[in-house]
Image (cartoon, rainbow, N blue to C red):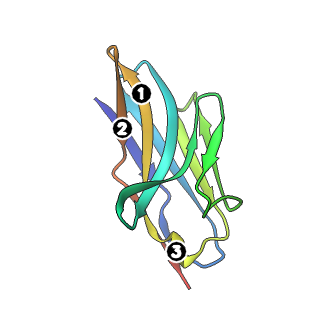
Amino acid sequence: QVQLVESGGGLVQAGGSLRLSCAVSGSFLTITTMGWYRPAPGKQRDMVATITNSGNTDYAGAVKGRFTISRDNTKKSVYLQMNDLKPDDTAVYYCNAQYLSYGSWYTGWGQGTQVIVSS
């Protein structure tokens, strides 16, 4: 069983910063793409940022230039540095990882961490 555990959410004023962390544990051979998602109107979860195991990144337009995704493969972790936060960034943020376990590929999700940005 593979688990993704997020941390780092909280309450912050507009213009402030937060850093989210997500650690992956359990029985898997390798992790490829990791990312962060949040709910969006009409969607269960919308991509915020993703990073491949070679370090290629992709960002949603609304966060480009403000958020930075990174990962530490030795720690099996992914991070999201969020700067210049806006009230519209308020959401539950979910960690995501694509991993290979016992010969099959899976998509794992964390339980979510709440981010609240006050104006």
Q: Given the image, on which type of amino acid does mark 1 rest? A: Tyr
Q: Given the image, on which type of amino acid does mark 3 rest? A: Asp
Q: Which mark is residue 99?
A: 1
**Helix, strand or loop status at disc 1:** strand
Q: Which of the 4 image quadrants contains residue 67?
A: bottom right
Which residue does the image show at 51% across and 28% down from the upper left? Answer: 32
Callout 2: few (<14), some (14-19), or many (20+) C-alpha neighbours within 10 Å?
Answer: some
Q: Which of disc 2 and disc 1 is earlier in sequence?
A: 1
Which residue does the image show at 52% across and 49% down from the upper left? Answer: 21
Q: Which residue is mark 2?
A: 108
Callout 1: few (<14), some (14-19), or many (20+) C-alpha neighbours within 10 Å?
Answer: many
Please give left or right for residue 112 compared with residue 69 in the image.
left
User: Looking at the figure, which quarter contains the C terminus?
Assistant: bottom right
Callout 3: few (<14), some (14-19), or many (20+) C-alpha neighbours within 10 Å?
Answer: few
Is any part of residue 114 visible from this angle? no
Q: Which residue is mark 3?
A: 88
Which residue does the image show at 57% across and 47% down from the upper left? Answer: 79
Q: Which of disc 3 and disc 2 is earlier in sequence?
A: 3
* Residue found at the far bottom of this picture: 119
The alpha-carbon separation of the residues under discs 2 and 3 comes to: 26 Å
The alpha-carbon separation of the residues under discs 1 and 2 comes to: 8 Å
